[in-house]
Image (tube, grey):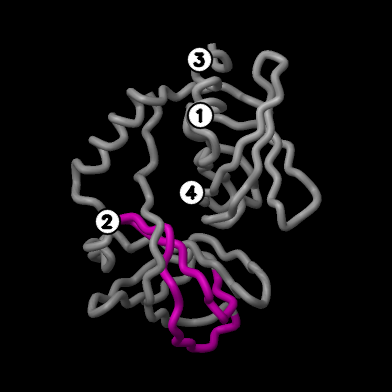
Amino acid sequence: MTQQPEPRVTVDLPVRVWGMTADGRPFSQHARAQNISSEGALLAGIESELKVGDIIGVQCEEKKTRCTVMWVMNTGPIKKNQVGIKLLADQDCPWKAYLPMQGTTATILESNRRKWPRHKISFPIELRDERFKTPMRISATDVSGNGCYVESIMPLPIGTVLRVDFYLQNEHITITAVVRTCDPGVGNGIEFTGDPYSSIAGVETTGFR
């Protein structure tokens, strides 16, 4: 059995970040911590170019920690850089208060698993961000009645609203969805949000056998 990654929590916490830029200059700025876990986070709105492997400081409220830069992604002039960080082994988690208590998440996951069983298959789907014309044709993995996981080296931002198209036994299904998790360089967790009692129920009863 493969070990499941630690669940991440979608938040938008103000933080202060400091350290050295990729060209060796000191920086200090305010940013936002998103997609957090006890081991790391996604930092959004980073103005400076950072170097993968460098150590930076992060402060959330009154708690400070030191982290390793795991990846850097330029998301354009508005959102600036997104940075994935991992806490050093000897550091306390500064956003622990915003994480679910140990055991709570596991209970929710078990409940979801009973309601919507997961299916480890490769399932072709088409994702369309209505802001752009070109659809993304991709294979979903880890599919269930309320969502799926799609692998992509350039995953979509959390909160992106999508239209999902796929076929079940020659029937064309269209459903709305939203991006719930973003693992840069890996993929997205997608939750189906439209018409749950017809389209999604049909996925479970007819599509994944």
Q: Earlier in the sequence, mark 3 or mark 4?
A: 4
Q: Position of residue 19 (x, y in %)?
A: 44, 81
- Whether pointer 4 and pointer 2 mark residues with C-beta atoms closer than 8 Å, the reply is no
- Residue 111: name its quadrant: top left
Mark 1 residue type: Asp
**How far apart, in angstroms, are the residues tagged by discs 4 and 2?**
16 Å
Q: Is 47 covered by the magenta stretch?
A: yes
Residue at image position (61%, 53%) is 156
Mark 4 residue type: Arg
Please rate how many residues cluster around mark 3, counting C-alpha atoms within 10 Å: few if below 14, some from 14 to 19, many from 20.
few
Q: Earlier in the sequence, mark 4 or mark 1?
A: 1
Mark 2 residue type: Leu
Q: Earlier in the sequence, mark 4 or mark 2?
A: 2
Residue range highlighted in magenta:
23-51
**How far apart, in angstroms, are the residues tagged by discs 3 and 4?**
24 Å
SS assignment at label 3: helix
Please rate how many residues cluster around mark 1, counting C-alpha atoms within 10 Å: few if below 14, some from 14 to 19, many from 20.
some
Q: Which mark's residue is nearer the viewer, 1 or 3?
A: 3
Q: Which mark's residue is nearer the viewer, 4 or 1?
A: 4
- Whether pointer 3 and pointer 4 mark residues with C-beta atoms closer than 8 Å, the reply is no
Residue at image position (57%, 65%) is 72
**How far apart, in angstroms, are the residues tagged by discs 1 and 2?**
24 Å
SS assignment at label 4: strand
Q: Earlier in the sequence, mark 1 or mark 2?
A: 2
